[in-house]
Image: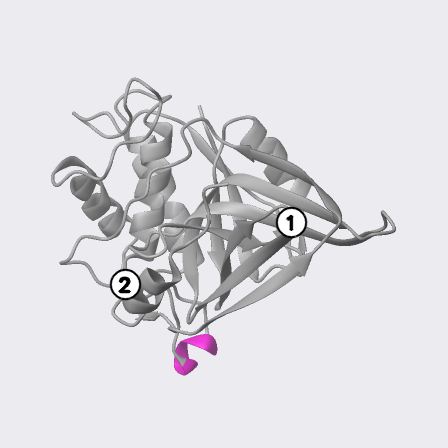
């Protein structure tokens, strides 16, 4: 799997990177806001030794775009995630990004350009009323802004939340990805992970996100670990996400247990 990070690069980069999600103590007393907050530069690694393991793994064809906010924006994780979703569906619904294709003929997604993707991001930034009522966006502002943009391009969109309290409908997430749909993850402060895979053990590196953040899931990775007696001793269920960050651009988000406020399957027609 492609996920083993260069930890020296990670350690050097984490201090200077801003994560585009967070809330203050005062905001926590009202509606949760998704805004800028420092990325905590600590990480830890765990080793899982096993006799054998089974894997259920799937990504959408070509993965998903890896966009990040343009330099003039602040508190923009909602706009970045929304633009990533639009860039993903641009492959299947013409002119989602006017005047530009988000993908190559091979089906892989192109890097963010300097004109068309930022134009969509700025429009999304305004539609979500970023920083208008408070810093960043609320969940409802994110949902309403994303819907308004997609409707404005002439398409219908519905968003199905598969999180209820501490429960998540993981099978619904897998079904969505199998049907070539992406999922907007609205997460409280928590962790994302990087997986290193070897013949008899895995290493799981934890990267802490300091504040509430919006990411886009485009894959799933479920692992069953068995011991020397061929007994199942651990199951890890992840979603593969585009983080909206420079480092790491992609990561794994663990859903057993999860730290999500919501997870919206995005249906476009």
Q: CA distance from mark 2 to mark 1?
A: 29 Å
**How many marks can you see?**
2
Which residue: 27% across, 50% down?
A: 68
**Which residue is denoted by mark 1 in the rendering?**
237
Compared with 23, 187 (above or below) is: above
Which residue: 19% across, 27% down?
A: 98
Which residue of the protein is positioned furthest toward the front in this rendering?
A: 199
Residue 158, position in %: x, y?
Answer: 48, 35
Which residue of the protein is positioned furthest toward the bottom in this rendering?
A: 25
- Quadrant for the C terminus in the image: top left
- Left or right, residue 228 beside residue 184: right
* Residue 83 belongs to magenta span: no
Q: Which residues are magenta?
A: 25-29
Which residue: 26% across, 46% down?
A: 124
Which mark identifies residue 75? 2
- Viewer-proximal residue among 233 and 200: 200
Residue 78, position in %: x, y?
Answer: 34, 53
Which mark identifies residue 172? none
Q: Is residue 233 visible?
A: yes
* Residue 26 belongs to magenta span: yes
- Viewer-proximal residue among 63 and 138: 63
Which residue of the protein is positioned furthest toward the top in this rendering?
A: 105
- Viewer-proximal residue among 131 and 263: 263
Judging from the image, what secondary structure is the residue with disc 2 in?
loop
Q: Is residue 188 visible?
A: no
Compared with 10, 66 (above or below) is: above
Residue 156, position in %: x, y?
Answer: 41, 28
Judging from the image, what secondary structure is the residue with disc 1 in?
strand
């Amino acid at each position: 799997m492609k996920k083993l990070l260069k930890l020296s690069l990670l350690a050097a980069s984490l201090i200077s990177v801003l994560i585009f999600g967070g809330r203050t103590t005062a905001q926590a007393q009202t509606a949760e806001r998704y805004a800028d907050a420092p990325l905590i530069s600590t990480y830890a690694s765990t080793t899982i030794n096993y006799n054998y393991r089974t894997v259920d793994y799937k990504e959408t064809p070509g993965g998903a775009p890896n966009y990040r906010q343009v330099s003039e924006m602040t508190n923009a994780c909602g706009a970045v995630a929304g633009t990533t979703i639009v860039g993903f569906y641009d492959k299947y619904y013409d002119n989602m990004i006017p005047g530009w294709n988000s993908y190559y003929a091979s089906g892989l997604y192109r890097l963010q350009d300097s004109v068309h993707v930022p134009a969509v991001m700025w429009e999304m930034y305004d539609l979500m009323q970023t920083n208008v009522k408070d810093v960043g966006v609320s969940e409802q502002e994110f949902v309403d802004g994303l819907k308004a943009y997609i409707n404005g391009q002439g398409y219908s969109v519905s968003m199905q939340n598969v999180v209820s309290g501490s429960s998540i409908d993981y099978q619904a997430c897998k079904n969505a990805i199998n049907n070539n749909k992406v999922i907007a993850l609205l997460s409280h402060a928590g962790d994302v992970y990087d997986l290193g895979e070897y013949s008899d053990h895995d290493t799981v590196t934890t990267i802490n996100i300091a504040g509430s953040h919006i990411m886009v899931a485009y894959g799933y990775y479920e692992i069953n670990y068995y011991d020397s007696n061929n007994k199942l001793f651990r199951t890890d269920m992840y979603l593969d996400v585009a983080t909206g960050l420079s480092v790491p651009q992609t990561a794994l988000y663990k859903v057993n247990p999860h730290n999500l406020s919501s997870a919206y399957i995005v249906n476009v027609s």
